[in-house]
């Protein structure tokens, strides 16, 4: 806070911009959305920066009315999504700063990281020069496109995360990957595991993989890195009369292995188990949990984390389970070849998942000791074990060439004499 106040006192520069916020009725009248989009894109096209909404050009903290904070935050998020290409995902923080009278008043701090892409905003392609944005000259723009295209040759999951520090990684979460035979320092170990890489300035920072596997909440840097799980009462998402149509809902975050296990528990809790007395009572669940486990591991391991605003969606219905994973199928694979071929979009992530032990209490979800086996058997397990249980084969399909959908039919035994919820 003291650092931000000092920057406000010193004025705008290459990394900080001030904007007064004004309103016309129930909409934001200033700053103009196109102008603000240009400013934020300029930061992203450079090394990042901060825009403080609620500070005027005279460096006075005039604030944003408390009851208008949601309105202004929505205004910023929408312009970042709608009129900047590719979209931006700034970190928006609500703060209180002292005004000239000493009163603590709300402001919004919009933190934009330097991007792996070149962003176009309504006015064109901008970058930051001193305290102002400037449209990029054609030769400068061409060099920037070339530089950032080359940077993306490095796998996305091994890219350093701007502004994250190694201290943001929880020691117990990265120490579990340490060898008992080699006594590496933290920095050396994280580099070996592709959990840390130097940024453009040479500062070691967590990679996407590091954040996903060793951060208590990866959403701090990757807002889309979670599983949205919903259990519905019927066979579709529409409300049915006055009945509650959602039985359960949960946003599941944490390290990727923890997300998988929590999602498995969500399925176990919400699926039905059929009880049959033929040849002695036995229980028949709607889903084979080992298939659900494999499907979730594949989803977190192979999804495209670079797609803005896209999360894994787990949806349970009375007759099926749907799992949506962002991103098309990697490399030259097809839906038909999934059971037979291997291709990893996130090699560092899959490598660490193969080293993650499955806790003893969760062994029921899988017959192995690690989260992944990297032998390419997961898809076949999903298809075969689910078909044995329900008599129907699961189906993989692509949605708009940007999302992989898996549908697992629920078991519906005709001889069931009773239904019970899972124990």
Image (tube, grey):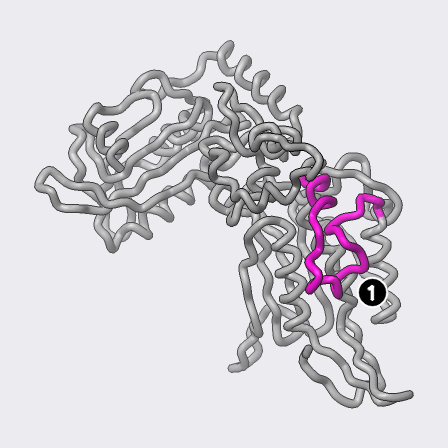
306 shown above or below 27 = above
Does the magenta run of residues contain 355? yes
| Nearest the eye: 297 or 70 | 297
Q: Would residue 399 be seen by someone viewing this image from the given angle?
A: no
Residue at 68 percent across and 77 percent down: it is 422
Q: Position of residue 66 (x, y in %)?
A: 23, 52
Task: Specify the quadrant of the image occupied by residue 185.
Answer: top right
Above or below 40: residue 147: above
Q: What main secondary structure does the magenta stretch of the protein show?
A: loop
Q: Is residue 64 left or right of residue 209?
A: left
**Residue placed furthest toward the right:** 279
The answer to which of 384 and 24 lies nearer the viewer is: 384
Q: Can residue 173 be seen?
A: yes
**Which residue is disc 1 drawn over?**
386
Position in image of residue 292 (x %, y %): 74, 61
- Left or right: 164, with 71 as reference point: right
Residue name at image x 52 percent, y 49 percent: 216
Judging from the image, what secondary structure is the residue with disc 1 in? helix
Crowd around label 1: few <14 · some 14–19 · many ≥20 (10 Å)? many
Q: Is residue 49 above or below residue 54?
A: above
Q: Residue at x 23, y 46 (%)?
A: 106
Q: Which residues are magenta?
A: 349-376
Screen quadrant of the C terminus: bottom right
Placement of the N terminus among the 4 image quadrants: top left
**Residue 59, quarter of picture:** top left
Report the front residue among 85 and 44: 44
| Residue 10 spot, x, y in % from top left | 21, 23
Q: Quadrant of residue 110?
A: top left
Tell me, yes or no, whether the highlighted magenta stretch contains residue 131: no
User: Please, is residue 16 above or below residue 28 in the view?
Assistant: above
Query: In the image, residue 248 lies at what x, y percent?
Result: 56, 71
Q: Is residue 408 left or right of residue 8?
A: right
């Amino acid at each position: 806070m003291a650092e931000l106040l000092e920057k406000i006192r010193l004025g705008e520069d290459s990394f900080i911009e001030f904007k007064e916020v004004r309103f016309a009725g129930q909409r934001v009248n200033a700053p103009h959305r196109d102008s603000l989009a240009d400013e934020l894109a300029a930061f992203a096209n450079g090394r990042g920066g901060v825009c403080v909404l609620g500070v005027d050009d005279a460096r006075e903290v005039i604030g944003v009315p408390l009851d208008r904070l949601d309105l202004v935050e929505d205004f910023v998020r929408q312009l970042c999504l709608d009129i900047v290409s590719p979209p931006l995902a700034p970190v928006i923080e609500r703060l209180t700063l002292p005004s000239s009278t000493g009163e603590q008043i709300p402001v919004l701090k919009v933190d934009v990281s330097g991007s792996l892409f070149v962003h176009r905003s309504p006015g064109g392609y901008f970058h930051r020069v001193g305290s102002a944005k400037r449209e990029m000259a054609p030769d400068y723009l061409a060099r920037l496109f070339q530089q950032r295209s080359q940077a993306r040759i490095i796998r996305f999951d091994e890219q350093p995360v701007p502004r994250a520090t190694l201290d943001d990684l929880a020691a117990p979460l990265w120490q579990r990957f340490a060898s008992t035979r080699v006594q590496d320092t933290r920095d050396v170990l994280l580099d070996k595991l592709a959990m840390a890489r130097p940024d453009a300035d040479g500062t070691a920072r967590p990679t996407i993989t590091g954040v996903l596997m060793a951060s208590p909440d990866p959403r701090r840097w990757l807002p889309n890195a979670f599983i949205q799980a919903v259990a519905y009462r019927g066979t579709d998402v529409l409300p049915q009369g006055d009945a509650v149509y959602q039985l359960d809902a949960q946003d599941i975050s944490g390290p990727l292995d923890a997300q998988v296990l929590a999602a498995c528990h969500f399925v176990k809790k919400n699926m039905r188990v059929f009880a049959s007395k033929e040849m002695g009572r036995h229980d028949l669940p709607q889903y084979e949990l080992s298939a659900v486990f494999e499907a979730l591991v594949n989803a977190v391991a192979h999804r495209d984390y670079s797609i803005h605003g896209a999360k894994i969606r787990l949806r349970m219905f009375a007759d099926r389970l749907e799992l949506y994973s962002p991103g098309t199928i990697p490399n030259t694979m097809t839906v038909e070849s999934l059971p037979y071929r291997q291709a990893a979009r996130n090699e560092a992530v899959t490598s660490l998942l193969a080293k993650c032990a499955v806790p003893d209490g969760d062994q029921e979800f899988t017959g192995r000791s690690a989260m992944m086996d990297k032998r390419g058997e997961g898809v076949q397990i999903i298809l075969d074990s689910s078909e044995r249980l329900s008599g129907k084969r699961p189906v993989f399909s692509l949605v708009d060439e940007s999302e992989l959908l898996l549908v697992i039919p629920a078991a519906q035994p005709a001889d069931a004499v009773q239904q019970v919820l899972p124990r």
